Image (spheres, rainbow, N blue to C red):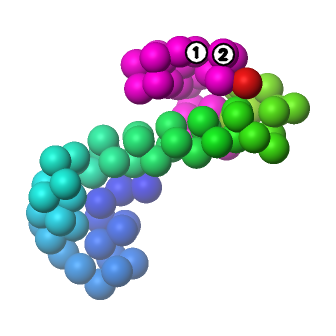
């Protein structure tokens, strides 16, 4: 996912997409990371509890489980395993 692909799908300029997100105080990449982490958090704490943490990380768009673990802990204050 990139700002360019989102802009193209919405018929907007890349600059405008960045400007819209700038108003929220988040960059495009920060917003994407936040959405991926929220998705993973929901999966860990609800119906997907039988999935392995690594599978949830991959399903949420993370290709590196170590990076996912670091980001998750930084965002929520606890490990993905603790979210179960």
Q: Position of residue 26 (x, y in %)?
A: 22, 46
Residue 28 against residue 20 in the figure, above or below = above
Pointer 1 local density, CA inside 10 Å: few below 14, some 14–19, many at least 20: some
- Name the side, left or right, on which 58 lies relative to 78: right
First to last magenta residue range: 57-83
Residue drawn 41% across and 42% down? 34
Kindly check if marks 2 and 1 are in contact, taking CB atoms under 8 A apart as contact.
yes
Number of dots carrying numbers: 2
Q: Magenta region's main secondary structure?
A: helix
Q: Secondary structure at mark 2?
A: helix
The quarter of the picture where the N terminus appears is bottom left
Which of the 4 image quarters holds residue 7?
bottom left
The quarter of the picture where the C terminus appears is top right
Residue drawn 17% across and 65% down? 20
Farthest residue to the right: give it: 50
Which of the 4 image quarters holds residue 8?
bottom left
Residue 76 against residue 49 in the figure, above or below = above
The residue tagged 2 is 82
Q: Position of residue 67 (x, y in %)?
A: 48, 20
Q: Position of residue 69 (x, y in %)?
A: 54, 18
- Name the side, left or right, on which 34 lies relative to 19: right
Query: Observer-nearest residue: 34 or 9?
Result: 34
Residue drawn 35% across and 56% down? 2
Residue drawn 58% across and 45% down? 39
- Residue 71 in sight here: no
Query: Observer-nearest residue: 55 or 24?
Result: 24
Q: Secondary structure at mark 1?
A: loop
27 is within the stretch colored magenta: no
Residue 24 against residue 74 in the figure, above or below = below
The residue tagged 1 is 79
Pointer 2 local density, CA inside 10 Å: few below 14, some 14–19, many at least 20: few
């Amino acid at each position: 996912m990139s700002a360019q692909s989102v802009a193209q799908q919405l018929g907007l300029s890349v600059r405008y997409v960045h400007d819209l997100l700038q108003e929220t105080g988040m960059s495009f990449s920060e917003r994407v990371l936040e959405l991926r982490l929220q998705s993973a958090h929901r999966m860990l704490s609800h119906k997907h509890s039988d999935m392995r943490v690594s599978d949830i990380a991959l399903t949420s768009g993370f290709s590196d489980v170590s990076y996912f673990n670091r980001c998750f802990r930084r965002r929520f204050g606890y490990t993905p395993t603790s979210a179960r």
